[in-house]
Every structure is written in C-alpha cells, then in structure tokens.
Image (cartoon, rainbow, N blue to C red):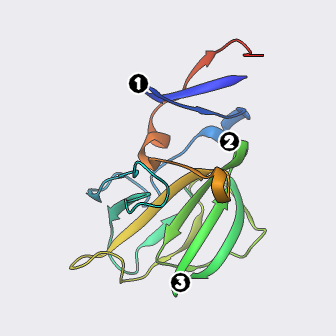
Amino acid sequence: MVVLLFSPGAAVTRTPESSDLDFDWPTGGPVAVLRAFDLPAQRWQSGHRGVDLEAGAGSPVRGAGAGRVAFAGKVGGKPVVALEHAGGLRTTYEPVQALVSVGDVIARGDLIGELLPGHCEGASCLHWGAKYGTGRNEQYIDPLLLLQPLRYRLVPDRD
C-alpha cells in the first residue's frame, strides 16, 4: 500500500498512476482563498467541505487534474461539475456552467466550464471540493493539499 502524505498527520491512500496525480489551480493560476476548508468533527455537522477561490463571473474553470467527467448538472439548484481522478479521488466545481459532458476525458488544465455568479456573498468565487469515497464512506480533503508536491512513504501491511 502507498500512503501519500499531504501534510503532517494527514494521510490518504491512493495508487499513483504516472502524471495522473499532478494537480493545478482550477482558476488557471494562484488566486486568493476567500474561505478555507473547514471539516466538521462529525459528518452531519455544518462545515465547509472545500475552498472558495476568488474568481470573477464568466472566468474559465479548468480541470485541476486529469480525469473523467462524472457529473455535469444541478445539485440543489446549483450547477456543478464533478471529475473522477486516479485512485478514487473526485473533485467538484460550483457554480459552473459546464462545457463538458458526462464521460468526457480531460487533461489537467482543460477547460471544463465558465464560472457563474452566486456562490460567495458580495463576491464571485469558485467553490472547489475534493473527496474520496461515496455515501457514508466519503472522506473530504482540503483540495489545496492537491497542489502541494506529493511525498510517498511505504507502510507495512497491518494484517
């Protein structure tokens, strides 16, 4: 098993596949973080399961990493694009008018949509999320950690 350490004390298991683990800003370059990741202590509690990145309405939104479009539509009335990446990682982007369709394969940095207004109060922003698993097995991670260089560490099996 390979454990990827993103920051001290935070480990996520993935299987590396060449450059599929390379990620970049979905805004095309570094921007201000208007609201940081804030994972609640319990899954049912409120928190902020992503980051809000400063960007103007109409700005291009790019796939942060290589993957496949898993969803492009509305969730709770909000337009969302979700990408599946290597190792079971899924990234989400909202509010985004999709320029891609479910099943499309994209490279890191490919245009996936256009930012719509309406997420941040008093400003335009892109909400960018990242998680592993689904349902009760969801594990949200701070998507900004994807931008840091990966450090690999082998750990022994725990049978």
Disc with the residue nearer the chain's start (1 vs 3): 1
Work out which residue is located at the far bottom of the displayed protein and give it: 77
The quarter holding residue 120 reads bottom left
Residue under label 1, please give it.
8
The span from disc 2 to disc 3 (Cα, nearest Å) is 30 Å
Pinpoint residue 49: horizontal percent, then vertical percent: 44, 57
Tags 1 and 3 touching, CB below 8 Å:
no
Q: In which quadrant of the rendered image does the C terminus lie?
A: top right
Identity, as a three-letter code, of the amino acid under mark 3: Gly
Residue positioned 46% across, 77% down in the render = 95
Give the answer, above or below, for where 65 lies relative to 114: above
Frontmost of labels 2 and 3 is 3
Give the answer, above or below, for where 84 lies relative to 87: below
Residue under label 3, please give it.
76
Residue under label 2, please give it.
20
Mark 1, secondary structure of its residue: loop
